[in-house]
Amino acid sequence: MKAVLLYLVLVGAPVAGIYGIVRLGQDLKPPISVAGAWNVELTPRTADTAPCRGLIVSSKSLILKVTQTGPHLALTLNDQNATRLAGVVNLERLTARSLEQIEAMPVAPGMTSPIQLQANIDRQPGLDRLSGTFTFANCPAGTELSFTAMRQQRGAGAGH
Amino acid sequence: MPVLTTLLIQIVIILATARALGWVFRGIRQPQVVGEMVAGIFLGPSLLGWLAPGVSAALFPSTSLSLLNGLSQIGLVVFMFLVGLEFNPRHLRGKKRTAIVTSHASIIAPFLLGSALALYLYPKLSDDSVKFTHFMLFMGTAMSITAFPVLARILTERNLMRTPLGTLAISCAAVDDISAWSILAGVVLLVRSSSSGLPLWLALMLAITFIGTMLFGVRPLARRLEVAYHKRGKLTQDMLAFIFLIVMISAWITELLGLHALIGAFLAGVVMPKGEDFVHALLGKLENICVVLLLPLFFAFTGLRTSVGLVQGREMWFYCLLICAVAIVGKFGGATLAAAANGTPWRESAALGVLLNTRGLIELVVLNIGLDIGVISPALFAMLVLMALLTTFLTTPLLVWIYRPQAIQLRDRVPTFEGATAIRE
């Protein structure tokens, strides 16, 4: 009898607590998921002429990989260390800036980051899309490069 | 470089590093496994990739990792089979009531605290691709794990196995093992059924049917193996092949059912005959290859997935410390209070709390499952890996501090089972 009572107190009460936590947690709103690989397409009008295009595009296809922890993002373009960015997602807006200085292109005075990314997230069932711009701090002209990106299909249950 | 050459070089480096660090950690009275876990982290982006990214990329190119992963997963399947093999209801002999109450309390307390922590961490470390319930259940599970193999190893090394504390600890760890894997199976089923489109009730029914088949269909069949073993006086290659078939088919079916292959492997171990001779013979055949060759590959693969660099800034380190604190308070506190409430003296209760707080490689197995099914982010994975390392590292010094060897001498020795403590780590 004592063991049963002990079990009820030590195990039963926490189980009730867990049930309460499940109920409380339903109202929590986490950040939007942007993790995964995105196929980036540069807007044709600017893609070929933008002088800084070479900074991020070394091949025909451009993949933006996003690792997400809550609102914090780590991004890479085509897995290149030179184009690693750190950013945040806030509601449906994504902003990021590059971590590394690109040696070939000196940073403009007062600018600490040569590449910035800003994008809006458009979520449709089965089709997530980013549309935004890359901004190059030290580009002589045409400092913005517009793009759209589609998220690649992810494995079942694979978040982040 | 040819694929096989790359793989062989990787294995050489992993084994050498694991052995070297295992030796170093044994020198500071830590179990070998702690050194091997640290070796994995060292070979990953947290150290080698950070100090020498070129060397890291050459040694572990991302294209080669699927092969390494495959080998490490096979190692884990065999390891989980051995963990299940060592689960023996006889461990609970004479201690069933205390063990069940203490063990369940030592699971539910960290589970509750882990769930409460999930309320705080969910908006900060997760995103809307993960449901709160899944995140919470996983956090609870990750907090409540005890590493039976590491615990058994520490008890053996500390000469505590035949003491009342040792028998109670091993009994609790046995109940912990079966309970934690059942909870994890439920969590994985829940997460996968919600993304696969298979109704939960159907997934649950299929899982229960499979478990029933294993317990009431395969177990009696497996008992014949023991009879054949005694008749022949040894484990023949045919018997081993049959056992491997059971393990692999069970792992395959649980994977198909939306559980995890490792849960099937564990279950295959649970339904094996528990005769001491048979278990020893089977361990003798499988253990060394699994522990010496394959598990270090798993540690290395885990290390390659662990990027401590993702834990950036004060905020992230605060979350990491919070996770460690909640894990320790929940497991240590829950086990200590429950054992004391059951009439165990406070010192022994605290020692039991320290022992059950050991998470070791079982935690790494669970965390890898969580990362695979997408319930936790890479940064949270890194934090939880650090928690697993810390709690495992703390066990021996805390145990020596709380439960001094001169105080126990060989007093109160009781006869106990052998075999459950085969040296794995």
Image (spheres, grey):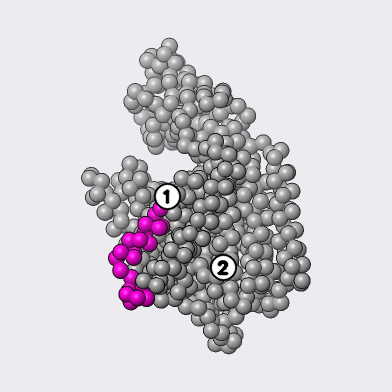
- Any part of residue B267 in sight: no
Picture quadrant of residue B279: bottom left
The amino acid pointed to by label 1 is: Trp
Disc assigned to residue B90:
none
Quarter of the picture containing the C terminus of chain B is bottom left
Q: Chain of mark 2?
A: B
Magenta segment includes B247? yes
Q: Which residue is mark 1?
A: B252
Residue interval drawn in magenta? B229-249
- Looking at the picture, does residue B278 appear above or below residue B34? below
| Residue B79, above or below B64 | below
Spatial CA distance of label 2 from label 1 is 27 Å
> Residue beneath label 2, please?
B173
Image x and y of residue B406, in percent: 56, 86
- Please say if B170 is above or below B389: below
Q: Is residue A14 left or right of residue B281?
A: right
Residue depicted at 22% across the width and 45% down the height:
B2
| Residue A61, horizontal then vertical, whole percent | 37, 25
- The amino acid beneath tag 2 is Ala
Residue A12: x, y in percent? 73, 59
